[in-house]
Amino acid sequence: PPGNATDGPYTYACREEDIAPGCRVRVPFARGNRLVDGYVIAVGDQPPEGMRNIKEVVQVDADVRLTEEELETALWMRGRTLCRYIEAIKMFVPDEEKVLGKTKDPFAGFEVSSSVPEQLTGEQERAFKEISEPLDRREHKVFLLFGVTGSGKTEIYLQAMQKVLDQGRQGIVMVPEIALTPQVIRRFMDRFGKEKVAVIHSRLTRKQRVVEYDKIRSGQAPVVIGARSAVFAPLKEIGLIVLDESHETSYKSDQSPKYDTLEVAVKRAMAHGAVVVAGSATPSLADYYRSEKDIFTRLSLTERFNETPMPQVHIADMRQELRLGNRSIFSQALADGIAESLAKNKQIILFLNRRGYASFVSCRECGHVVRCGECGISMPYHKDQNACVCHYCGRKEPLPEQCPACGGQTIRSFGAGTQQVEEKVLELFPDARVQRLDLDSVRKKGSMESILSGFEKHKTDILIGTQLVAKGLDVANVGLVGIVSADVTLNIPDFRSAERTFQLVTQAAGRSGRGDEVGQVVIQTYTPEHEAIRCAARHDYTAFYKGEIRLREQIQYPPFCDLFQLILSDGEEEKASALAERCARWLKRKAGKELTVMGPSPAPLSKADGAYRYQVLIKSPEGQRRSTSEMLLQLKRLYTSEKEATSLLTMDVNPYSFM
């Protein structure tokens, strides 16, 4: 496929003998013969029958060549994710930039000290032995390491990686949030040495990224750590691929190619005879289901490392708090818990799944909500900017002095955001050292690392954060975790809302009591009877899984089918709606009785970046994914040939989010 110009294979002649599948070439393209880059996907001795006037390759780039395994994976991704050829191939080709002079080491300030393997518990030893057997035989196998929070999964990763390095092979370790990568990087650098660890993530500069890729290609760094893009690291002989916190949604790309990192890891591992370990205290229902069906091998860690007990959990019914006259953000139980923890010199994490000063701005007289004119979603008020801000397009508007709909004077912000929680904490506990950890507070490079380091060193008493604080943060002195509103994720328009809530509450609670003392957790909710919250409070994944998987089977949602999402958008709502109707009709004609076509309907995020969005969903039974994908690729070709300049069609297979 020549560069970004098109999506399909073209035939060229080449006189050079060293050309092979995976090579990057320079070729004349289209009538104007402009020179573009392309990648060779096949080489033959004879041109296709009847083809004449074949153009010649101008140049073969000897420096860029995908291996047979990389090219095979890229072509597989094209069919698997419905992306373009070039989008899949380029995942294996990093942005290039000649490195002139010295490049700043992104980890120059890291304090690295040597560490030795820890003594494994009985459960850890059994899990490590299971993983070691296919490693020793160099056989492909996929493990689900199902371990409660604080059970010592990382030490198993480290010892498995040592075994792989002793065999002369290499490994990849991925974490969901780059914000938390420094903790993981430090543990691996301590164990294996700084020079043997390469890091791949989006916060590196282009020059730093090239340096890291050179370390990998040369064999200098046999251990690669990073976010999801690390799965494409150009390792020659992969022995182990680890996905830590494998349930996290950030392992699914939200840009084309919309790949599932675990699927790509398994595909690459099969080609290398490598082992994949997906570790989580709250695995996705789909992954746990695969372990029930023996597609994955499940290894369980039921106890915390060093036998630290699980935290004690208290559910605070916020309806009862209101009846008692408490209109504060904090229940009495949470306020008392904060006071007790501060008195004991223990640290506190307050978790809520939203950022900004408040969730929305509304009029108490007529109910009007301030919304973004471009995106159609509510705009929370950010006090530090004295503005209402759209979290999708970045648009800012001043806080209205009166309601634009009815002229009322009682327009104000509702709901608790991180800034509002911070203000309330400082009002109640003025001597506490408080820090926020959310996307707004970490935009400046290095600020995330600074906040985490300050908390680890107890320069902060209370850390207030969004989802970031629930993802693997390991600080021994945390005595209390307060979940300010467990209900937020229950109300998103997604069939996984209960699963998301269970995972977030369990993971956030797991940050408490990781030292010697029993931790405390307070869960604030208006729906204490909900099964996701009750099971999370009991640390009972199995009970939650059994109830939720039964419901999924009844309504035939993943993992009992593949779910394809089509988003059709246009700057004019009528055009977007008409295009969605045409696509839905075409699909219903083609689908037959085996597929279920739902919609079209306005997408949950019905307007974004000035475009109206409509959604069509397709349920494809188990075993039908390939034929459904081929049908959608046919639709994509038809759309491309007829598309209007302003319209856009995007496709996603088993999306993690419907926003």
Image (spheres, helix red, strand yellow):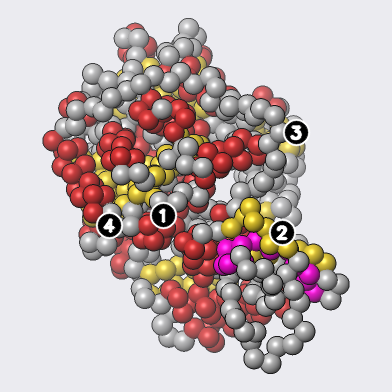
Task: Identify the secondary structure beneath mark 2.
Answer: strand
- Tell which tag, 1 or 2, sits nearer the viewer: 1
Determine whether, in the image, residue 431 is placed left or right of residue 611. Answer: left
Q: CA distance from mark 3 to mark 1?
A: 46 Å
Q: Quick one: label 2 or label 4, which is nearer the N terminus?
A: 4
Label of residue 139 in the image = 4
Name the quadrant of the C terminus: bottom right
Determine whether, in the image, residue 645 is placed left or right of residue 467. Answer: right
Write down the region rendered in magenta: 19-30
CB contact under 8 Å: marks 2 and 4? no
Q: Residue furthest left?
A: 122
Q: Is residue 411 above or below residue 14?
A: above
Label of residue 398 in the image = 3
Q: Nearer the viewer, residue 59 or 74?
A: 59
Disc 2 crowd rating (10 Å Cα; few below 14, some 14-19, many 20+) is many
Amino acid type assigned to the residue bearing label 3 in the image: Pro
Measured as percent of width and height from the top left, residue 108 is found at: 55, 22
Residue marked by disc 2: 611
Q: Nearer the viewer, residue 624 or 506?
A: 624
Q: Quick one: label 3 or label 1, which is nearer the N terminus?
A: 1
Q: CA distance from mark 1 to mark 2?
A: 35 Å
Amino acid type assigned to the residue bearing label 2 in the image: Ala
Residue marked by disc 1: 265
Q: Quick one: label 4 or label 3, which is nearer the N terminus?
A: 4
- Tell which tag, 2 or 3, sits nearer the viewer: 2
